Amino acid sequence: MFCIDEVVVHPNSGVCRIADIRTERFASSAEKYYVLSPVFSTTPTRIYVPVSGNKIKLRYPLSKQDVLSAIDSSLSVKAQWLDDEKERNERFSSVLKEKEPTAIIEMICELHKKRIERVSEGKKLKSNDEKILSEAERLIHLEFAYVLGIEPDNIAKFIMNRLNIKDETKAG
């Protein structure tokens, strides 16, 4: 069981602080809830997660070493780009659903590399690939930003620099 003031990762809302643990009656019976406050939210937001619930899995943030290791190991797995858009979308959607940080980073790197390749050909990344990239970055960047003490908007640049990947899609 988590405690008040601990920081956890919510699968959809990212890094949250446990503001309270209290009994609430949202349905027919009273139940104990974690009251979460997203760390990077610009507006006061409260998320209620049942303490005994199995549907929403809270976890502690990765350690700094785990984050850096996940980033560093993302280049060692050579994922093969799927030209079939439907198959690629299914694979990427599965990665997003599983929410495993290393797999998400590998996918982000794969999409960034494909974006760089497409830009060098005078083309853009497919719109669905852009949407998946955006969601993947949102999922991972909040946690990494918290763990590394970096602003969320700077995480992509941090990862690309750490991996020595030049982003040629940005004007210089």
Image (tube, rainbow, N blue to C red):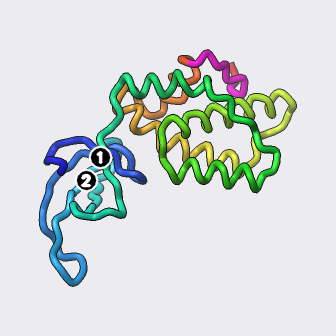
Residue 100: give its label.
none
Q: Is residue 2 left or right of residue 111?
A: left
Of the pair 70 and 17, the residue shown nearer to us: 70
Q: Quadrant of residue 28?
A: bottom left
Q: Quadrant of residue 164?
A: top right
Q: What is the secondary structure assignment of the residue under circle 2? A: strand
The residue under label 2 is which amino acid type? Leu
32 over 128 or under it: above or below: below
Q: Tell me residue 90's x, y (percent).
A: 67, 55
35 over 99 or under it: above or below: below
Q: Is residue 153 left or right of residue 170?
A: left
Q: What is the secondary structure assignment of the residue under circle 1? A: strand
Q: Tell me residue 19's x, y (percent).
A: 18, 51
Q: Quadrant of residue 136?
A: top right
Q: Is residue 144 magenta?
A: no
Q: Is residue 167 magenta?
A: yes
Q: Which residues are magenta?
A: 163-170
- Determine contact: label 1, label 2, CB under 8 Å: yes
Looking at the image, the residue that sits furthest to the bottom is 28
Label 2 CA crowd tier, 10 Å (few <14, some 14–19, many 20+):
many
First-in-chain label (1 vs 2): 1
Measuring 21% from the left and 57% from the top, which residue is drawn there? 35
Residue 16: give its label.
1
Q: What residue would you read off at disc 2? A: 36
Main secondary structure found in the magenta portion: loop
Measuring 50% from the left and 50% from the top, which residue is drawn there? 98
Of the pair 115 and 154, the residue shown nearer to us: 115
Q: Tell me residue 129's x, y (percent).
A: 69, 46
Label 1 vs label 2: CA separation? 6 Å
